[in-house]
Image (cartoon, rainbow, N blue to C red):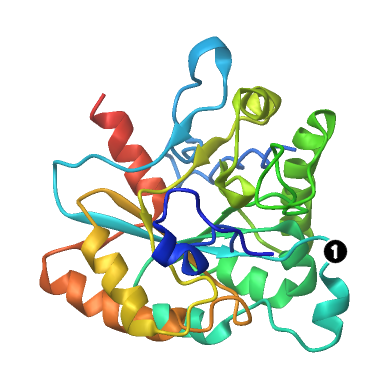
Amino acid sequence: MTIRVRQVAAACALGAALTACGAPSAPHAARPAPSAPSAAVSRPPTLAPGPAGLTPVFKNGPRTGGKTVALTFDADMTADEGPRAAKGEHFDNPQLISTLRTLKVPATVFMTGRWADEYPAEARAIGRDPRFEIANHSYSHYAFTGDCYGLPTVAPDRMKADVERAYTAFKKAGVPNAMPYFRFPGGCYDRRALKALSAVGVTAVQWDVVSGDAFATDSDAVAQQVLDGVKPGSVVVMHCTRSAAPATERAVRMIVPELRKKGYRFVKVSELIGATGRHR
């Protein structure tokens, strides 16, 4: 189920839904070169915990230091949507992933565990492609707060387990190194949810640019909304679901060259988070 974003104007409401594309396992030590000391593989950058140890929330990178932008794609599939997939509904979008590869655009895919269960080969291929990184969008795609666009809710004592279950699904699919980043279904969170996930060690990732691709059929409008909204350090939320976001792939083919003409460089969320840490 794709969720509408509160912050989008009424005219864009149908196109601005925000539901996308256990802690992650610790990285293994790298093999040392002959006669060289061993070195541990560096952990992906995360933000320091917030006040009272709450899960930190990241919305955009530094506005100075260069024109960088992160395209993120939510690979959505809600836990109860299996029957729809069995009837032929496509929650994946392999053409979009192919286009990103062709255009040489790095991206972060926020994936639900249920999506990985449904499309394990695609999850594995994305996760093993160095151009991409897979991050967590929960297992169930149920809301972590009440009143979140009609989504069923995860009980507070099950929130941590739901996130950990998604990491387990990624590992089962063959994703080698899922990132310690989490996007709340619908973008809905509160202090209780941030506290519940504090033990997982993730950074919650939101956005500052809504593409409006959810349910949209006008690729030109989606592209223009992104182009109008992007600033240095922006995080753009889009979707990797054919049935819920059929205009996304064509919009990306318009967005990428235009932003490059403006001097933007595409990066993954991990690079923006790392840059944020260096600017503090």
Relative to residue 278, is residue 108 depicted above or below? below
In this view, the residue in front, 4 or 95, is 4
State the image coordinates of residue 24 (x, y, percent, origin top left): 66, 42
State the image coordinates of residue 46 (x, y, percent, origin top left): 46, 34
Q: Is residue 64 visible?
A: yes
State the image coordinates of residue 47 (x, y, percent, origin top left): 44, 29
Q: Amino acid type of disc 1?
A: Asp
Q: Is residue 46 visible?
A: no
Relative to residue 109, is residue 183 depicted above or below? above
Q: How many numbered circles are shown?
A: 1
Image quadrant in which the C terminus is located? top left
Residue sitting at x 46%, y 72%: 213
Residue sitting at x 53%, y 38%: 204
State the image coordinates of residue 53 (x, y, percent, origin top left): 56, 15
Q: Is residue 119 left or right of residue 46?
A: right
- Dot 1: within a 10 Å radius of its alpha carbon, few (fewer than 14), some, or many (20 or more) residues? few
The residue wearing badge 1 is 80
Res 58 quadrant in image? top left
In this view, the residue in front, 26 or 113, is 113
